[in-house]
Structure formats: structure tokens, C-alpha cells
Image (spheres, rainbow, N blue to C red):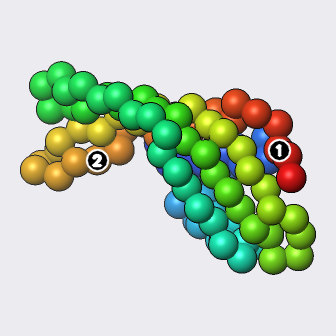
């Protein structure tokens, strides 16, 4: 088990180096990207903050169409040594990819 996990295209990557490869591939394939946060709810419990929301992503691929999808996301951040650190960051696609 690794605490550094990134999932893309149904493949799970573990560790910072693999995460960088996945994220770099997305950035290199994309001409532009717009994220709209449609709704957000948060609450605090001790040193942790729990959030859930709805968002819309719009991508323009360099060699392809514009892609739009909607997601629901959850985050948990916790104050550790005076800094907020992500404990969980999860998103789930609510709609199939569409042009």
C-alpha cells in the first residue's frame, strides 16, 4: 500500500513519480481546461475539514474535440504541524464523456 495513489483511465498508479507521469500526460494532451465549482458544502471537526461538491470540467484537447463532464467530489484535509494536508481527494464522474 502507498499513501500516494492516482487513478486514471481505470489504472491505479502508486507513488509520486507515477502520479507525475499521469498528470503530465493530461496537461500535455490539453489545450485548455476550465473547472466550474457548482456546489460545495464543508464542515469542520477538530483539526479536519470535510467537503463535498459538484463540479463541471471543460477540456479542449490539442488534437481533438472539446470534452465536458460533471463530477461529484469529496475532500478531507487535516491540520498537521500547522499546515493543512490532504488526507482524501476523490472525484467520481457523473456523466459519460460527451462532445
- Label 1 crowding class (10 Å Cα cut-off): few <14, some 14-19, many 20+? few
Query: On the image, which quarter does residue 58 sit in?
Result: bottom right
Q: Mark yes or no: residue 22 visible.
A: no
Q: Nearer the viewer, residue 62 or 56?
A: 56
Q: Given this view, does label 2 or label 1 mark the residue nearer the observer?
A: 1
Q: Nearer the viewer, residue 12 or 96?
A: 96
- At a point 19% along the width and 27% down the height, the residue shown is 44
Query: On the image, which quarter does residue 23 sit in?
Result: bottom right
- Label 2 crowding class (10 Å Cα cut-off): few <14, some 14-19, many 20+? few
Residue 81 position (above or below residue 72): below
- At a point 36% along the width and 38% down the height, the residue shown is 87
Label 2's element? Answer: strand
- Residue highlighted by disc 1: 97
Residue 37 position (above or below residue 95): below
- At a point 49% along the width and 40% down the height, the residue shown is 38
- At a point 24% along the width and 25% down the height, the residue shown is 43
Label 1's element? Answer: loop
Looking at the image, is mark 2 or mark 1 earlier in the sequence?
Answer: 2
> From the viewer's perspective, is 5 left or right of 66?
left
Residue 95 coordinates in the image, percent (x, y): 76, 33
Residue 14 coordinates in the image, percent (x, y): 61, 49
Residue 49 position (above or below residue 66): above
- Residue highlighted by disc 2: 85
Q: Nearer the viewer, residue 45 or 69?
A: 69
Total numbered labels placed on residues in the image: 2
Q: Mark yes or no: residue 40 visible.
A: yes
Q: Give yes or no for contact between labels 2 and 1 (Cβ–Cβ under 8 Å).
A: no
Classify the position of the N terminus by image quarter.
Answer: top right
Residue 12 coordinates in the image, percent (x, y): 70, 44
> From the viewer's perspective, is 27 left or right of 73?
right
Checking the image for residue 4, the label placed there is none
Q: CA distance from mark 2 to mark 1?
A: 31 Å
Amino acid at each position: 500500500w502507498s499513501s500516494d495513489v492516482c487513478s486514471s483511465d481505470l489504472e491505479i498508479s502508486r507513488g509520486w513519480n507515477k502520479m507525475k507521469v499521469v498528470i503530465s500526460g493530461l496537461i500535455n494532451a490539453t489545450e485548455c481546461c476550465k473547472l466550474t465549482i457548482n456546489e460545495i458544502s464543508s464542515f469542520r471537526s477538530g483539526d479536519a475539514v470535510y467537503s463535498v461538491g459538484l463540479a463541471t470540467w471543460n477540456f479542449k484537447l490539442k488534437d481533438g474535440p472539446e470534452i465536458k463532464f460533471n463530477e461529484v467530489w469529496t475532500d478531507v484535509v487535516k491540520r498537521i504541524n500547522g499546515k493543512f494536508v490532504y488526507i482524501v481527494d476523490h472525484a467520481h464522474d457523473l456523466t459519460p464523456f460527451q462532445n
